[in-house]
Image (tube, rainbow, N blue to C red):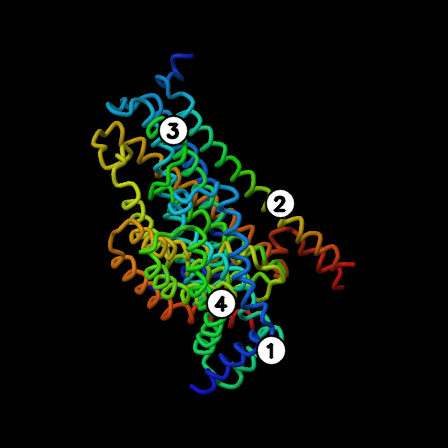
Amino acid sequence: MNELFNMNGYEFYVWGSVVCFVCVVLLDMVSLKTKKKQAERKIKAMHKRAKR
Amino acid sequence: MNKLIRLYHQIGSPPSFYQISGYFLKPLLSLAIVLFVYGLIDGLFFAPEDYQQKDAYRIMFVHVPSAWMSMFIYALMGLAALITFVWRIKVAEAVMMASAPIGAAFTVITLITGMLWGKPMWGTYWDWDARMTSELILLFLYIGVMAMYSAFDDDPRKAARLTALVVIIGLVNLPVIHYSVYWWSSIHQGSSVKIIGTSGIKDWDMLRPLLVMALATKFYYGYSMLHRARSYLLKTEYKKQWVHLILGLHETKEKTNE
Amino acid sequence: MIRYWAICQRDLLATWRKKSGIYQPLVFQLLIVTLFPLGLGAGAQTLAKISPAVVWILALLGTLITLEHIFKDDFEDGSLALYVRAGLSLPMAIISKALAHWITTGLPTVLFAPIIGILLHLPETAYGVLMLSLLLATPIFSLLGAVGSALTINLRSGALLLSVLVMPLLAPVLIFGAGAVLETALGNSAKGHLLLLSGALILTITLAPFAAAAAIKVNME
């Protein structure tokens, strides 16, 4: 297992970059999902208010 | 030709854009994920070692595609901004505003991975080298675009047009900034040797993961941008009937009318 | 033409009556410049080394703090709308207002720069180029500032946003301007830098008024 992740002394930099890349992309995915939920919730709330 | 014109108008109208883009979301995301996984495994484990930089060059497989995307997205955002400003097409607004956070995300990735690449190669995390500096300024441009829009939260149409103007001004200035920064760094550190450059890649085994990752980031951008643009349209068109139909609010509204 | 001059005159008069608009940026520069020796140590050599950049950055920041008000008052009391109603060309009106801003903040900054230079031990050979480069660049500050100010007139606290918007645009100007002074201080010719700076000035004069006019029009809708 250790051999697989071995980067000849550059582990921190290479894996750090990959982790950073994956994390930012995942963050982006979370944020786009929350954006959508926020939009839907806002519209539904407004709709309810309008109905009253 | 008629079909083409119809398609053009369909894409320009928010409800059909919402509908059509819905079909693309899943395929784009799955393509992006598959290519990400393939590209990363290929690049990290199977691509041959670089004779000069050893394994550190593997950072390239995330750094370079992100750098390409950070500029590509700004160009697309600029195009959408032009359309927004001249023709006031709402879908273009949505595309513009959806692109900004993704572009900023890729710019951040580029900067961080660049720093992580710089430490083993240059011996320092940050060097005021031309590429890093102009990338940092690009990040400021993205931040300015997003800040401009969020400053006007009461009037989204006006905010979008002003933001489009900011994007266009940035687009005009981008080449000026780019070249002036290059010129500046060539005066200040003419002696420093630049090891990092992608022009030297000739090995297909190194090039393949890079191209795969470049494609993957493009697909991911497509997915994220469409997804964000859809939310943007929902939010700005909240009074329209098609939004109510999609969210299943329509029937309740008819009841209240009776 | 007389009408545009009248706009400029009116702005000049308003600033002259208030006075604070003129000396504020200069006092600001003086305050900041005092901090440099205090933080860096008063060694003449250290100061001389950073002086071209510091004088330039101070000139830039000094104008930046005054930018917010270029259009704000006129927008809020409706004079801007009146100019448009009266058939004045908006870009021209913007040029007149930017000119007034330049006369009240840019010009004093240019004249004040040698004093800052002396305080920082700027090499004697560099003063001419320092003033020339600032003379070329301060109109750019005013014009680009007008664009930023036009974009943010509707906002209550747009100062930070304005800096975020204007900073990337000013980066090339700083590179060429401070570069010109630095080259002269090192004993090289600054001709290339100054020519590029004039090019930037011409480009800004032709484009910035239209960008600012577009922003004001959107804000008025």
Q: Quadrant of residue B60 in the image? A: top left
The label number, if any, that marks residue C105 in the structure image: 4
Work out which quarter of the rendered image holds the N terminus of chain C and state it: bottom left
Mark 2 neighbour density, 10 Å: few (under 14) some (14–19) many (20 or more): few
Q: Is residue B150 left or right of residue B6?
A: right
Q: Position of residue B131 (x, y in %)?
A: 34, 43
The three-letter amino acid code for the residue at tag 2 is: Lys
**Total label count?**
4
The three-letter amino acid code for the residue at tag 4 is: Thr
- Pick whichever, B251 or C94, lies toward us: C94
Badge nearest the viewer, 3 or 1: 3
The chain carrying label 2 is A
- As helix, strand or loop, the secondary structure at mark 3 comes to helix
Q: Quadrant of residue B205 in the image? A: top left
Badge nearest the viewer, 2 or 3: 3
Residue occupying image coordinates x 42% and y 12%: A2
- As helix, strand or loop, the secondary structure at mark 1 comes to loop
Q: Quadrant of residue B115 in the image? A: top left
